[in-house]
Structure formats: C-alpha cells, structure tokens
Amino acid sequence: MIEIELPDGSKLTFESETSVKEIAGRIAKSLEKNAVGALFNGEIIDLHTPIRESGKIRILTPKDPESLEILRHSAAHILAKAVKNIYGHDKVKLGIGPATEEGFYYDFDLPVSISEEDLEKIEKEMERIVKAKEPFRREKVTREKAKELFKDDPYKLELLEAIPEDEEITIYWLGEDFFDLCKGPHVEHAGMVKAFKLLSVAGAYWRGDSRNKMLQRVYGTAFWKKKELDEYLHRLEEAKKRDHRVLGKQLDLFSIYEEAGPGLVFWHPNGAIIRQEIEKWVEEEHRKRGYQRIYTPHIMKADLWKTSGHYNFYRENMFFVPVVEHDEEQRLGNEEVPLTSEEIKEAHWYAVKPMNCPGHILIYKSQVRSYRDLPIRFFEFGTVYRYEKSGSLHGLLRVRGFTQDDGHIFCRPDQLKEEIQGVLDYVMELLSTFKLDYVINIGTKPEKYIGSDEAWEHATQALIDALKERGFDYNIVEGDGAFYGPKIDIAVLDAIGRKWDGPTIQVDFNLPERFDLTYVDKDGQKKRPVMVHRAIMGSIERFIGLLIEHYAGLFPTWLAPTQVVIIPVSDKYLEYADEVYEKLKGAGIRVKLDDESAKVGYKIRKAELMKIPYMLIVGEKEQQSGTVSVRSKREGDLGAMDLNAFLDKILTEIKEKT
C-alpha cells in the first residue's frame, strides 16, 4: 500500500504504483486537467514520474512558482534538440541543460561557434518543435543500454559514471529522434512551451573546472504566459540601463584593474564620497546601539583558522601565505627566488582573513568577563579577502576583496532573543533609510557543520522566535546555514524587483565552544556565552553596487558625490556664480561651479549625464534679484528661487535623507 499525504493533512491510499495525474484526479477533475507536476517529498517531479512510495505531495499547476522548473527544463531540451537539428546530431555533443532561477541554459560542444546572431535561427527551430507538439517520454534504462546510447558523447558518459550503482537511470525522449540522460522534470509535450526567448551565448568550462574544455553555453528563459515573458524582458532592458559597471564608469565611481588583480576594487573620489557618507551613517547608528568600534589585522596565523573551523570548512576560499623566519629576517619567496621545499616545511603559515570573527573572539578573550558585562557588542569595518573563481567575478557584486560592516555580539543565553531583535530593528532602519523592500529567509543546518544537533536546534528556534515576536514573515531554506550556525538572511529587492544578498544574522553556539569563551555568572561559575554574527549591509561593495542599480545612478541628495552644480549662462555672471558657490560650500553642500566656456545646453547635458541632483542656472535676472533658477534631476524645472530658500530646502533633504 502507498499512502499519500495532501497539504491539508488528509491522506489517500493506493494499492500499487501511482502517478501525479491519478492523485490529482482523486482530488478534483479540474486539478487533474491543470496539473503539470508535483512537489513530492520535497522534490519536483513531473507527470511522467511513477510514484512507488508513500510521502507528502502538493500538486503543481502553472500558477505555482515551482512549476517553472518543469517548463524551463523542458525548454532546455527543446533548445538542445534544435541545436542538434541545425548543426548535426552526430556533430553536437551535449553537456548539461538545467533550469535556473531566471530561466535555463544548455552547454554544447560543437565544431562551429554560436554567435548572438545565430540565436534567432535556433529560436525558429525551437518554435517549429513547439508547433509540432513533440511529446516528452520518460524511459528507464539499464546502465549498459545507457552506455550504448551515449557511446559517442563523452560528457554524458562522464555523468553516467557519477550515478550511484543503486540509483535508477532514466532518459527523456523528445519526439522520436532526440534523447537525453535526465531525471526530469518535463512537461507532457513541447507545445506547452510557448513563451520563451534565447538571451545570450557565453563560454563555460565543463563542470565549472578551468582545467576542462570550454563549451558554448546558450542562455534562455521561459514562462507560462507571453505577458510574463514580456514583463521579464522589459526588466532585463531596464537592468541594462542600471548596470552598475556601466554607471560606475560613467559617474567615475570605481575601477578594477587587471594589473592589480581581478576582483579588487579601487574607489575613485566620487565613489569614495558615497562610501564615506554610508559609513558615517552606519558608524553613528552602531554607536547609538551600544557597539564598540574595534580594529583587527588583515593577516593572522593559519592555526587560528584551524581552531575556528574555517581551515577545514572554508579553505578553498582563502588565501594563504608561507612566512619563513631567519632570526630577524623573513622571506616570502617570489618567482625569481621561490621558497625551497625545506623552507616551506619550516614556514609559519598565515591566512589573509576571509572573515573577522576570530579577531573579535580574541579581543573578547583578552580579559575575564562577568555576566554584568554582557552583552558585549563589537563592530568594525573589516576588509576581508576570499578566493572567488575569476569567471564568477562581477563588478562590485562578486569580488575578492571587500569590506563588511561586521559585528559580533557576545551575550548570555537569556539575552539572545532580545539581541537578535535589536539587530532586526537596526536592519529595518537601514532598509527604511534607503527605501528598500526585502524578503526574510532562515537558513538551517547544512550538510557539513560543526557542533551538536541540540545546539543547532536551540539556535534555529531563537531566530524563529525573534522573527515571530516582531511579526515578520519568513521562509525556511533547508541546509542554507553557515557551517557554524543557522542564520537569518534578508534578501533586498531593488527598484525592478531583483533580489540581492543583504543583511545577515547568524547564531553561533560553536565558536564560543571551540575557543573556550566564558563569562563568570552570578553564581560564580564559568558559563559559555552565545555569539551572534551580524552584518547590517553585508559587503559594502555589494551594497553600493545594489544602490547604483536601485537608483539607476541617481543617488538621493545626501549620498550624491556632487549635490549641486552652478551653471552661469555666460562669463559675465561668473562673479555672482562664485558668490553662490561660496555660500553653498560654506553650508557644507558638495557643490561645483561649471565655469567652462561652453554653451549652457552643453553644460546642462553634462550635469544630466553625471546625474547631479540639482542645477542652479544663474544669469542677469538671477544676479539682479539674488535668486537662482533651480532644475531638479527628479522634479524638473522648479523656476526661480531665493538662494536662502533653496539652501533650506536642500539642507532639509540631506538631514532627513529623503
């Protein structure tokens, strides 16, 4: 007997193997008609997948977000068949073709290069397959048959070898002449994939390993309805206009230089102003919330990272340096004079810090702590370095060197919930200040972790309780915690609805144990504190990248590198323009005087491109009346305004961060 539990807790029983269709039909005929798959025991399956065991099920229709995985995986197979049809079934070798959060892709090894211009041709062939409503069909095969089917495709044979001996092997057919090694899920026939679009082509190493062959990856997306596809494509176009890498260059904010190293950010004066203003606000907010500012080194002994667990769980993302000490001298080694094998054996290994927590822990341990001292809240703008593969680096969003507004709270267990709520309050203040929406996720115990299951349960429950008492909605993301503890991750939504990694709050019972942290309780006994890791912005680099795209480069006045530009209509009014400049500068406004001998229209256009919030045009009329003609980048032409009135307006705007 197979027992199937429905979302409402009711149960259906079947005498033998069943299917999503049959289960949906037992619930309602309308559901059977609209079903495209199901979420069964946490896994998305399609209508082709037999159900041979008991479990929990939720039937999926096109209204369910999870159903997009079924649609998009099917679109990837249609893409693969179209490419084989065009370039030759015997000439195209297939890599992988999964669904992704934004769409799908497929990796190809073929003798010619696919260009962006070729995508239209491939799309037309996909449309032909869709119009023919070619069916998807699932087939269970033996390992021997699979090897025979894919004998000419080395990539599929490699994937086949990775399938455990006791695991079922399946292929999916599309029509009569295309098959792929695949577990699914897929729709019933290609005709269901109507709203799709190929987006780009790029290189991708097989299995993400630079030692392997470079394949050609074609990206696309698909939706159930054309309207949804059109809306997505519109967002993509809007995203191109907001690309922080393009705007960063246009507004002269930052650079990344290959000669200095990939993923390392150089802030130009304009970008430094934005960063400085944000850091000033963050520092003041920390001070008000009882944090103590500290500084820790950028490089520390490797043994420290072994104690923390980073060496075992995170070392592939760390930079290590061997230091050989000879009396008072030390040698690092270089290309001309590399370290000898003997020197390497004797070397003291150091790690460039990927995180700030061990440094904060050492400061906590520097003296005996009493229960009266807790909570202790440490904070630093800690610059860290993490090895990211060069192919994953992306402007400010994915870098190798970045700075966190990093803080660690050491508290008693009875203070934990209140401390989490205090951090949540701070996060909400941040999001409100920058006018950002958000989604809250709780990441639970990952596959690799340290500490006891009991400690993990306690920590996870503390996060849940803190959110519930504050009335926040949240999602549970199984296995997404850090290796040392569960976490709250807050995904920030930008102006066009994209999600960005943002604030994080992590509860840690494990590092206090590993470093033997204690405090003396009121009974005179040593007790173990709880540690809360938290970053309000997360990476400052990523946060500013988010803001550039969120604001499309037009920063609120309090953040704008140049807040006002003064434009005299001719050189005759430079003296009055200079008076206006001095008055604004004296009031603390970041102001520039455009005294270039050029036409007013050119100067206005230049200020528009630099996205300066306010332009003050001055000519004869303004000089005589002591006014300025105000143009707002957001509000348009505001007309003539008394200079003092304008000054009051902009100072209020800066103070209130509107």
Image: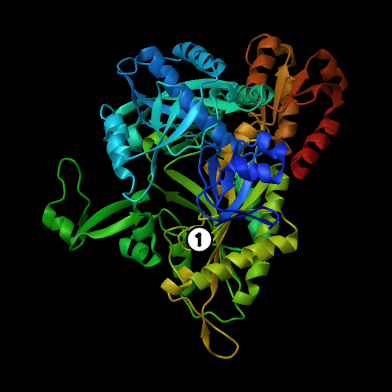
On screen, residue 99 above or below 120: below
Left or right of 365: which side holds 612?
right
- Residue 376: quarter of image: bottom right
Q: Residue at x 47, y 63 (%)?
A: 484
On screen, residue 386 above or below 214: below
Given residues 288 and 499, the one toward you in this image is: 499
What residue does disc 1 label? 445
On screen, residue 90 above or below 613: above
- Residue 86: quarter of image: top left
Left or right of 351: which side holds 392?
right
Q: Residue at x 68, y 65 (%)?
A: 465
Residue 219 point in image, percent of width and height: 48, 25
What colouring method underlies this structural image? rainbow
The N terminus: image quadrant: bottom right
Q: Amino acid at mark 1?
A: Lys
Q: Secondary structure at mark 1?
A: loop
